[in-house]
Amino acid sequence: DAGITQSPRYKITETGRQVTLMCHQTWSHSYMFWYRQDLGHGLRLIYYSAAADITDKGEVPDGYVVSRSKTENFPLTLESATRSQTSVYFCASSGDRVPYEQYFGPGTRLTVT
Amino acid sequence: AQSVTQLDSQVPVFEEAPVELRCNYSSSVSVYLFWYVQYPNQGLQLLLKYLSGSTLVESINGFEAEFNKSQTSFHLRKPSVHISDTAEYFCAVINPFPSGGSNYKLTFGKGTLLTVNP
């Protein structure tokens, strides 16, 4: 299917475990973003990428790692999950022609126990 | 740097009543402004945007927002709401011409939950 997809949609993991959230887009957008959504905080940027192999930190990067070996994929890894990382994670992308207009995936609800 | 303040975290209204969701922003540069809508258990969808030109922008489902530069506001309005408008609404801004090491990063407000009651 065309668009931007995230997997899994729901994930429960234990403290200390490594978990990877996947994001895939079919538009060949250059820009990709990871946000987390928490009650009372709105959406906060974790990491972003301007192109394959180019990534940079956002507002709340601690405890997260990203990679972008292919334009269409932008996985987010929690190296050692903590309860404070329980959240809903959204991936977004935007294209070169309209880089300021971001399209969002459906989200992944992550619970760390 | 930019910041966005959504003045109301929750707005309950009755069906067919008018509604206004308030958004103020702060920025040292000119910005583009957006309203996103998030229906329950879904991702964010772009509702409308102000880039330049007419300060009043409209969506296809009856919402409108007015950019007011002097008051640094971008309030969202609808003259008559429906039950299906129940959702969380996010105001966001972006610097469309980032320089140096910057990038196209949206800054979001904390959201306003609009609940439309019958």
Image: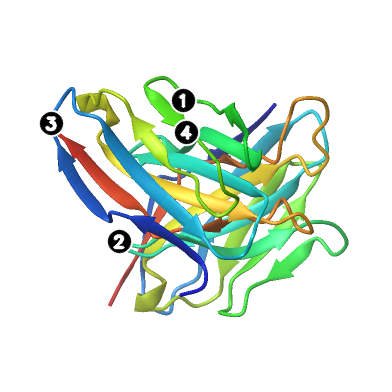
Tell me the chain of label 2: B
Q: Earlier in the sequence, mark 4 or mark 3?
A: 3
Please state which amino acid type lies under the numbered disc 2: Asn
Tell me the chain of label 3: A
Mark 4 = which residue? A66
Looking at the picture, tell me which residue is in the foreground, A106 or B67: A106
Mark 2 to mark 3 CA distance (whole Å): 23 Å
Please state which amino acid type lies under the numbered disc 3: Glu
**Which of the image's four quarters has the C terminus of chain A?**
top left
Mark 1 to mark 3 CA distance (whole Å): 21 Å
Q: Residue A60: which disc?
A: 1
Where B84 sits versus A100, above or below? below
Badge 2 and badge 4 both on one subunit:
no
Tell me the chain of label 4: A
State whether residue B22 appears in this view: no
Residue A92 placement (x, y as % from top left): 53, 51
